[in-house]
Image (cartoon, rainbow, N blue to C red):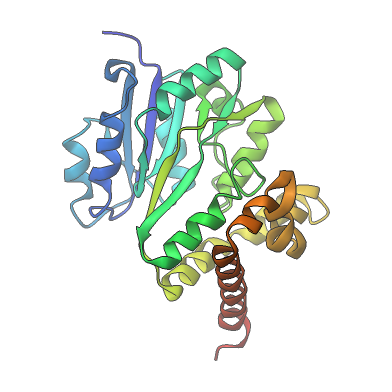
Amino acid sequence: MKEINVSVIITTRNEEEHLADCLRSVKNQSYPQDQLEIIVVDNNSTDKTKAIASKFTSQVFNFGPERSAQRNFGISKAGGKYIIYLDADMVLSEDVLSRSVRRCEDKDYAALYIPEKIIGQGFWIKVRDFERSFYNASCIDVVRFIRREAALKIDGFDETLNGPEDWDFDRRVREIGRTGIISACLFHNEGSFTLFRYVAKKRYYARGFGRYIEKWGRGDPIIRKQFGVYYRYLGVFIEKEKWKKIVAHPILTVSMFLLRITVGFVFLYSRYFKP
């Protein structure tokens, strides 16, 4: 049996709707299957998540209490030279692993960004995908494919954070090594868009922002970008000639800014003014 080169870590909690597609995308990789392993770390699912996972891999574990702890547990079980961490509603295009390994080997990168495409039903999913395309390899994005030795060197994910733990992980990886990006993408299935569910998700992960900001300091330049009005509402969309995409897609652009402003108002209202 060949040595494991890539460990795919998938964290789950009641993901029976999406998990099979995610796991099939790993099994359909152009990268040799005997050089990769799949590790599913579940957090007390009450549906068929574990049963579905067991059809694809023998490495199915139960661990919690949150995603950062699940990911660290997965890293501790991983035997690969490289790890890639995924959510259950993500699907890999077939060349992600082969291109990632080749890129890291050729360029000696510590980690890689993988372009993310939002998929689902309806016009607003197209708007979300358009918005997400501006974030690739920016400080809004996070590395997903990492040398395991680099992940261990920085002690994995900060388990005191829930939500921005991947931003924090990304920053600490970049402090110890070079990062790059590949052209192959992963697909993030957001289903059918509803404003209520979208805001609820944002609110859930926003609960950890205070701890993250405190850790790095409000004056930190990356913190100021990630939470500053200018960069989040304008800068990230026009830097590095990305403004050309804005000009080329006026309907998506207007809709994107309308969505961002609406979500901002709804979030503030629900947090500060709702009885």
Using the rendered image of the protein, determine whether residue 79 is visible from the camera's viewpoint. Answer: no
Q: Could you say where residue 178 lies in the image, as x and y percent from the top left?
A: 67, 25
**Relative horizontal placement of residue 98, taking residue 230 as reference (left or right):** left
Q: Which residue appears at 47% of the width and 65% of the height?
A: 201
Q: Which residue appears at 52% of the width and 65% of the height?
A: 202
**Towards the viewer: 133 or 86:** 133
**Relative horizontal placement of residue 92, taking residue 113 as reference (left or right):** left
Figure quadrant of residue 36:
top left
User: Does residue 261 sit above or below 74 in this rendering?
Assistant: below
User: Does residue 106 sit above or below 124 in this rendering?
Assistant: above
Q: Which residue appears at 39% of the width and 26% of the height?
A: 7
**Towards the viewer: 215 or 112:** 112
Residue at the far front: name it: 248
User: Does residue 101 sit above or below 186 in this rendering?
Assistant: above
Using the rendered image of the protein, determine whether residue 275 is visible from the camera's viewpoint. Answer: yes
Q: Could you say where residue 212 lies in the image, as x and y percent from the top left?
A: 66, 53
Q: Which residue appears at 41% of the width and 26% of the height?
A: 97
Q: Could you say where residue 20 lies in the image, as x and y percent from the top left?
A: 23, 44
Q: Quadrant of the C terminus?
A: bottom right
User: Does residue 103 sit above or below 174 in this rendering?
Assistant: above
Q: Quadrant of the N terminus?
A: top left
- Tally of numbered tags: 0
Q: Could you say where residue 253 lies in the image, as x and y percent from the top left?
A: 60, 64
Residue at the far right: name it: 219
**Towards the viewer: 61 or 197:** 197
**Relative horizontal placement of residue 130, taking residue 53 as reference (left or right):** right
Residue at the far top: name it: 1
**Relative horizontal placement of residue 125, taking residue 149 as reference (left or right):** left
